[in-house]
Image (spheres, grey):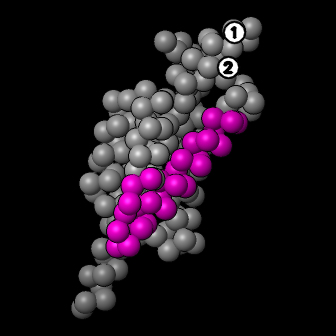
């Protein structure tokens, strides 16, 4: 169980680090990789698993989605999950290196790994919430642009 002061630090990190990184992440996929915003079904599935799962279950879900045999019309979904998996691996590595100064000192390797997973569960949940919100903004903008073109 994460302490109240640590949770507050994680929520601050969510606002100051994860939010801008989530915006950059989803906009890069759309603007640089040519992906479409995620469909609602994918957004809701990802959000539901992030709300209900521990970190290892979330990673399992992301990798399952990444490895699915998506049809060409849904290749953007595969790209999204591939990039999301890489992003979480990078975040976990940053956490393990204690870049954010969040880890307790003097823990056994097993306890330290458990703490990293607990923190990653919270950070992943926060990041995914920001992704979902930004995806919604971009989906709405895309719909507005399509309506404007039809006029």
Q: Which mark is residue 103?
A: 2
Q: Are marks 1 and 2 in contact (CB under 8 Å)?
A: yes
Horizontal and vertical percent for residue 9?
59, 25
Q: Residue at x 69, y 9 (%)?
A: 107
What stretch of residues is rendered in magenta? 67-94
In the displayed image of the protein, which residue is found farthest to the bottom? 151
Main SS category, magenta section = helix
Q: Residue 148 location, x and y as percent? A: 30, 85
Say which residue appears at 52% left-offset and 34% top-offset.
123
Mark 2 residue crowding within 10 angstroms, few (<14) / some (14–19) / many (20+): some
Q: Would you place residue 32 above or below residue 116 in this image?
A: below
Residue at point 63%, 35% (across, down): 92
Tell me, for residue 107, which label it has, or none: 1
Q: Is residue 140 visible?
A: yes
In which image quadrant can residue 138 be found? bottom left
Tell me if I can see residue 129 in this picture: no
Question: SS at mark 1?
Answer: loop
Of circles 1 and 2, the one toward us is: 1
Please rate how many residues cluster around mark 1, counting C-alpha atoms within 10 Å: few if below 14, some from 14 to 19, many from 20: few
Q: Is residue 111 magenta?
A: no
Q: Is residue 130 left or right of residue 92?
A: left
Q: Secondary structure at mark 2?
A: loop
x and y, in percent, of residue 70 in the image: 37, 63
**Can you tell which quarter of the image residue 147 is in?**
bottom left
Quadrant in which the C terminus is drawn: bottom left
Q: CA distance from mark 1 to mark 2?
A: 9 Å
């Amino acid at each position: 169980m994460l302490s109240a002061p640590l949770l507050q630090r994680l929520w601050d990190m969510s606002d100051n680090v994860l939010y801008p990184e989530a915006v950059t992440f989803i906009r890069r996929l759309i603007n640089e990789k040519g992906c479409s915003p995620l469909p609602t079904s994918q957004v809701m599935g990802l959000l539901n698993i992030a709300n209900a799962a521990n970190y290892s279950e979330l990673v399992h879900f992301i990798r399952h989605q990444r490895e699915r045999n998506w049809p060409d019309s849904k290749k953007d979904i595969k790209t999204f999950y591939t990039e999301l998996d890489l992003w979480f691996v990078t975040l976990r590595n940053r956490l393990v290196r204690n870049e954010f100064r969040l880890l307790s000192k003097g823990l056994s390797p097993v306890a330290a790994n458990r703490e990293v997973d607990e923190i990653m569960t919270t950070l992943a949940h926060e990041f995914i919430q920001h992704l979902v919100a930004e995806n919604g903004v971009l989906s709405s903008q895309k719909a507005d642009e399509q309506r404007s073109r039809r006029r």
